[in-house]
């Protein structure tokens, strides 16, 4: 974990998220406390529980982005789930323990990619050796029989072969054979596909059966023809898999899940409320009671081993327009001690969102058109007009936050994006008049804006 201070964390989040200072401050403290906990003496470390957070706000204000960027800063396993997809025991749907199984899969993938990056140079070297064996096979050379008098000729043949191979290696590394077709053999597990249907907890059964069969059955070789460039990638991945110790990968991944894992539970408000006697809401409270042990801390069995969830950080979010956090069962409320109300986005926030973040929408469209040699630019007043229209549509229709900017810009640039590949204009400037002509007229018509924007 990177030892970043809360102020540094907020500064990094500012590069991608506009406003929401209270939320940034809360998640920064929660992240720093995880690092602080690892410095505490062992006898007290296990007693320190994570500061789980509920982010309360309308859609499109940055709840998911804050959690996702936090996980990227911490280099931690991260998974986003929707609470409404889960059901209590006995109902059709996903069981809550699959959250931790998904998180473990993410962690194993993360660690494996890190290990592959560490051995990338060695794997590429081994892949080149295999490519050389294909391009210049040793079997093509005459066989020298050892009868006690031909050792000199044998050594000369070996030396000549090695010199030729070294020359070919240099040419291969220089990219001279990249487009040449070669036939390579790769190995794959022989495990029949099977579908197992059943109640909760059965979603991993098919995978486990396939793994058991894969361990008993031999590896299957498969030949394929491809270019040297693609063959190198395939062979390097296979060689990296041979070098990496998967037992070590799994140990590191399980530790990373338990100490650094972050779960983002969206739509928590959808399962808030009391149990109804009938109807579609019959399992709301049941879902809360099933989620509770995961958040409180329990052991979850995964195909990689048992995972303890005591120190996994849970960040929940919801609009809470109809329900409110106090409608959750008391035990679940107690496991989310920190609650932050997100601010609704203003017209000024929209202007900042369009230009300031590193992944700002305007920067994305400029980069997209730059691939075709077109320089797209936005007048400052045009940006303000786009923000004004987006805010106006959010006020008059459903408020979807910053996501409204996507629809506004897509509508504004639709003709340009469609016609430009065949056009000759290499510089396009977006002016306030263009925004008013293309978008503002639609926004002023309630019927049109409801369906188009």
Image: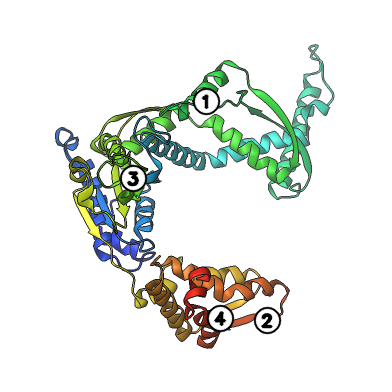
- Mark 3 Cα shell of 10 Å, populated few (<14), some (14-19), many (≥20): many
Q: Quadrant of residue 346?
A: bottom left
Which residue sits at x=23%, y=41%?
38
Q: Is residue 388 above or below residue 172?
A: below
Q: Foreground residue, 172 or 114?
A: 114
Q: Are marks 2 and 4 in contact (CB under 8 Å)?
A: no
Q: Earlier in the sequence, mark 2 or mark 4?
A: 2
Tell me residue 288's x, y (percent). Answer: 28, 40
Q: Are marks 2 and 3 in contact (CB under 8 Å)?
A: no
- Mark 2 Cα shell of 10 Å, populated few (<14), some (14-19), many (≥20): few
The residue carrying mark 4 is: 438
User: Which mark identifies residue 339?
Assistant: none
Q: Foreground residue, 381 or 28?
A: 381
- Mark 4 Cα shell of 10 Å, populated few (<14), some (14-19), many (≥20): some
Q: Is residue 96 above or below residue 323?
A: above
Q: CA distance from mark 1 to mark 3?
A: 29 Å
Q: Foreground residue, 357 or 340?
A: 340
The residue carrying mark 1 is: 196
Q: CA distance from mark 2 to mark 3?
A: 47 Å
Judged from this view, the residue extending furthest toward the top is 147
Q: Secondary structure at mark 3?
A: strand
Q: Secondary structure at mark 4?
A: helix
User: Which mark identifies residue 425?
Assistant: 2
Judged from this view, the residue extending furthest toward the left is 44
Q: Secondary structure at mark 1?
A: loop
The residue carrying mark 3 is: 262
Q: Secondary structure at mark 2?
A: loop
Residue 452 left/right relative to 350: right
For discs 3 and 4, the disc positioned in front in the rendered view: 4
């Amino acid at each position: 974990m990177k030892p970043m201070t809360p102020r540094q964390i907020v500064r990094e989040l500012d590069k991608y998220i506009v406003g929401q200072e209270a939320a940034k401050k809360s998640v920064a403290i929660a992240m720093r406390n995880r690092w602080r906990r690892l410095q505490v003496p062992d006898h007290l470390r296990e007693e320190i529980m994570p500061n789980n957070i509920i982010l309360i706000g309308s859609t499109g204000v940055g709840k998911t982005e804050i959690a996702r960027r936090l996980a990227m800063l911490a280099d931690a396993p991260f998974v986003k789930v929707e609470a409404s997809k889960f059901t209590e025991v006995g109902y059709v749907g996903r069981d809550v323990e699959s959250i931790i199984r998904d998180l473990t899969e993410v962690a194993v993938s993360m660690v494996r990619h890190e290990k592959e990056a560490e051995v990338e140079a060695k794997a590429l070297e081994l892949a080149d050796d295999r490519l050389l064996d294909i391009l210049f096979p040793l079997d093509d050379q005459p066989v020298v029989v050892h009868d006690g008098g031909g050792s000199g000729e044998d050594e000369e043949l070996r030396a000549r072969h090695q010199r030729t191979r070294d020359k070919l290696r240099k040419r291969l590394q220089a990219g001279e054979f990249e487009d040449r077709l070669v036939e390579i053999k790769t190995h794959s597990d022989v495990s029949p596909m099977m579908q197992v249907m059943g109640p909760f907890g059965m979603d991993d059964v098919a995978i486990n059966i396939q793994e058991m069969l894969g361990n008993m059955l031999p590896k299957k070789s498969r030949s394929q023809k491809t270019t040297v460039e693609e063959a190198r990638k395939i062979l390097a991945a296979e060689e990296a898999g041979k070098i990496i110790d998967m037992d070590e990968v799994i140990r590191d991944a399980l530790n990373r899940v338990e100490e650094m894992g972050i779960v983002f539970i969206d739509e928590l408000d959808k399962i808030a409320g009391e149990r109804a006697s009938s109807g579609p809401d019959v399992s709301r409270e049941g879902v809360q009671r099933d989620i509770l042990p995961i958040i409180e801390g329990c052991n979850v069995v995964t195909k990689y081993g048992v995972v303890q969830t005591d120190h996994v950080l849970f960040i929940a979010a919801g609009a809470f327009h109809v329900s409110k956090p106090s409608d959750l069962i008391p035990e679940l409320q107690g496991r989310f001690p920190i609650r932050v109300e997100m601010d609704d986005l203003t017209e000024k926030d929209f202007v900042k969102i369009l230009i300031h973040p590193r992944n700002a929408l305007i920067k994305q469209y400029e980069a997209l058109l730059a691939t075709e040699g077109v320089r797209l630019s936005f007048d400052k007043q045009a940006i303000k007009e786009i923000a004004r229209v987006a805010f106006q549509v959010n006020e008059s229709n459903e408020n979807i936050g910053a996501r409204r900017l996507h629809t506004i810009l897509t509508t504004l640039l639709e003709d340009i994006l469609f016609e430009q590949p065949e056009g000759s204009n290499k510089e396009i400037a977006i002016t306030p008049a263009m925004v008013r002509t293309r978008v503002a007229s639609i926004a002023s018509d309630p019927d049109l804006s409801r369906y188009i924007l």
